[in-house]
Image (spheres, rainbow, N blue to C red):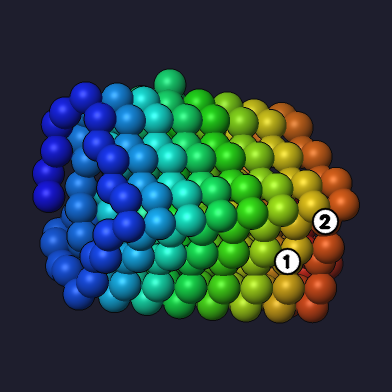
Amino acid sequence: ENTAINGIMINHCLFEFNFAKEGGAMTVVDSTSVIIMGSNFNQNKAAEYGGSMNVENSLKCIIQFTAFQSNIASIGGGIKAKNNGHETIFILHSTFTNNIGKQAGAIDIQTTAFVQINSSSFQNNSATSGSGGALITNSANDFVCTFSHFQNNNAKQQGGSVYVIGTETVTVRKSRFENCTSHLHGGAMSYKNMLKLQIVYTRFNSMISEDLISSSLVKH
């Protein structure tokens, strides 16, 4: 579905076994808001980016109580979100499991004002040839992750779970990173060109990186 409207809401829907070049199940462009609640995205595939969904230039994107499982894309196995720098993205009480991307196993977020992930779970997601086993956020003003769990995510390059690029402020609070692996730097998290990092009450267990010095976190 391709949409250019003022707002879109999806509530308690199932998207399964869909395929597209971009946004395996859905693409939303130039919308004032995208709200997805209580839905499931299973085994969708995109040839390029956004295995289950592709969101472009939407002022507000809220994903809540939604599950993304076994979706595949070249970039952003579950979600690809690309904006023009004034948008907010909220991912709340959602799960991302067994999603695969060459880059950004579950989520790829580009050029966004504010990104918040709260009370969500990322398990067994993989970036098979690039960075960000669970997610990549690039050029955001603020990235905030609270009360979330990252487990068994894997990246071929940087950031076994999270890769943050060009983001002014990164805050990780009361979250857990367990058994995450990168084959280059930062078993849990890798960051580049960032002004401020705050990590509070967060647990890192059994991180693995081929650069053993940076098995949990690395700045490069």
Tell me the quarter of the picture where residue 203 sits.
Answer: bottom right
Residue at position x 45%, y 77% from top? Answer: 98
Q: Residue 134 in the image: state x and y as whole percent.
A: 53, 63
Tag 1 residue: 177
Outermost residue toward the front in this view = 12
Residue at position x 73%, y 40% from top? Answer: 171
Q: Nearer the viewer, residue 103 or 210?
A: 103
Does residue 185 show up? no
187 over 152 or under it: above or below? above
Outermost residue toward the right in this view = 201
- Does dot 1 land on a helix, a strand or a loop? strand
Q: Do the numbered discs 1 and 2 sit on residues whose CB atoms are within 8 Å?
A: yes
- Does dot 2 land on a helix, a strand or a loop? loop
Q: Amino acid at mark 2?
A: Thr
Tag 2 residue: 202
Which dot marks residue 120? none
